[in-house]
Image (tube, coloured by chain):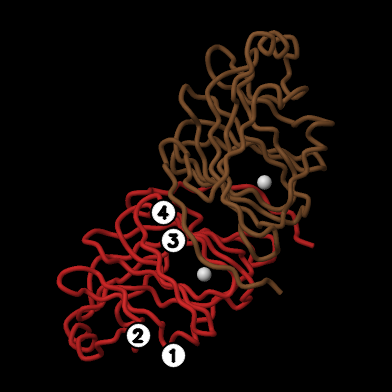
Chain colours: A brown, B red
Amino acid sequence: MTKLTFPFKVDIDFATGHVTAPAKVLTRRLSDLQGLFMDSAAYEQMLSRENPVLYDVYEIQVPEEAGHLASCTTVIYPGKVGKEYFFTKGHFHTIEETAEIYTCLRGEGYLLMMTRDGRSRAIKMTPGVSAYIPPYWAHRTLNCGGEPFVFYGVWPADAGHDYAAILDKGFKQRVMEVDGKPAVTE
Amino acid sequence: MTKLTFPFKVDIDFATGHVTAPAKVLTRRLSDLQGLFMDSAAYEQMLSRENPVLYDVYEIQVPEEAGHLASCTTVIYPGKVGKEYFFTKGHFHTIEETAEIYTCLRGEGYLLMMTRDGRSRAIKMTPGVSAYIPPYWAHRTLNCGGEPFVFYGVWPADAGHDYAAILDKGFKQRVMEVDGKPAVTE
Ligand SMILES: [Mn+2]
Ligand SMILES: [Mn+2]
């Protein structure tokens, strides 16, 4: 039985993704995504020159217990490693039978999803698109546009994050720039 | 264990609250809120002349099972019954230890919350405000502005809706127009 907790509010800036306190920002830089981009030579070369922020997550924290809902905005900045657009690490949920909803607030990107048994799906994200990530589907997002890609996500607060399978085996799909346009490849 | 379901997307119009298929619209008219407004004479008089739509809910339906997340937009139209602003029925969740998040997309309103043991809270909603309704708190929303009040909500899909306690005992707080401005009263 959950202890009584109290209502609160934050202010979300839909244009920048910024969220007021008590939200907390988590910043991921190029160096945090070692081994995940296809072109490792391009990755090492870029990292030798600079260590850019790939994305910021503004997390609205609540007790990590069943019944609560965690939420965040994510801001993925525009850019590529070689021909591959900046993306998030991607994860399964530790409690795999938990869903998540992502709603695009700004910019242009993709939501990539896959199951452990090899199914995959991609959803193009533009402002107003609200995508349903059902239980069991790992998820990664990427910015394939020229401005920040901002989306809002909600998930069961006890779901947990399992990054290990993605670090180990990668994501089934990639989105690369081909002839100046994003192309989803398997 | 949840059966495998597949990703999908809808398009949400943040200005109007409309959501594309497979979302479904639920329309609540004045006649659906019998017995809930303070001024019953004003209610009966209004209903004898017209039966306006008080609010529309565009629900993005998923399996009503643990782990899934239901979501909707709600559009509450501007108007009053006597001095009391148009509101939603309000409910507890049947599974009381489940939260909900409401994020305002347009207009101006209030989110009223109360517990069964008599606590109450009110949060003013304007675009970008994201309010956390923790487990155990009943919730009602109302439009205290001059244009549609639109918000987006997410909740655990198995939470269920318990309207009975509100129909029986009402909501602890009300928001009335006093000297041309909204005032929260207990
Ligand atoms: Mn997740
Ligand atoms: Mn609810």
Q: Which residue is mark 1?
A: B169
Query: Which quadrant does the C terminus of chain B fall into?
Result: bottom left
Quick check: do tags 3 and 1 share a chain? yes
Nearest the eye: B156 or A44: A44
Q: Is residue A100 left or right of residue B171?
A: right
Marks 3 and 1 close (CB-CB < 8 Å): no
Q: Is residue A137 left or right of residue A53?
A: right
Q: Which residue is mark 3?
A: B58
Q: Label 3 vs label 2: CA separation?
A: 22 Å
Q: Residue at x 75, y 31 (%)?
A: A172
Tell me the mark number nearer the camera, choosing from 3 and 1. Answer: 1
Chain letter of the residue carrying label 4: B
Task: Identify whether B11 is placed above or below B39.
Answer: above
| Label 1 CA crowd tier, 10 Å (few <14, some 14–19, many 20+) | few
SS label for mark 4: strand
Q: Residue at x 64, y 69 (%)?
A: B158
Chain letter of the residue carrying label 1: B
Q: Which mark is residue B36?
A: 2
Report which quarter residue B43 is drawn in.
bottom left
Q: Label 1 vs label 2: CA separation?
A: 9 Å
Chain letter of the residue carrying label 2: B
Give coordinates of residue B144: x percent, y percent. Answer: 27, 66
Circle nearer the N terminus (4, 2): 2
Q: Which mark is residue B129?
A: 4
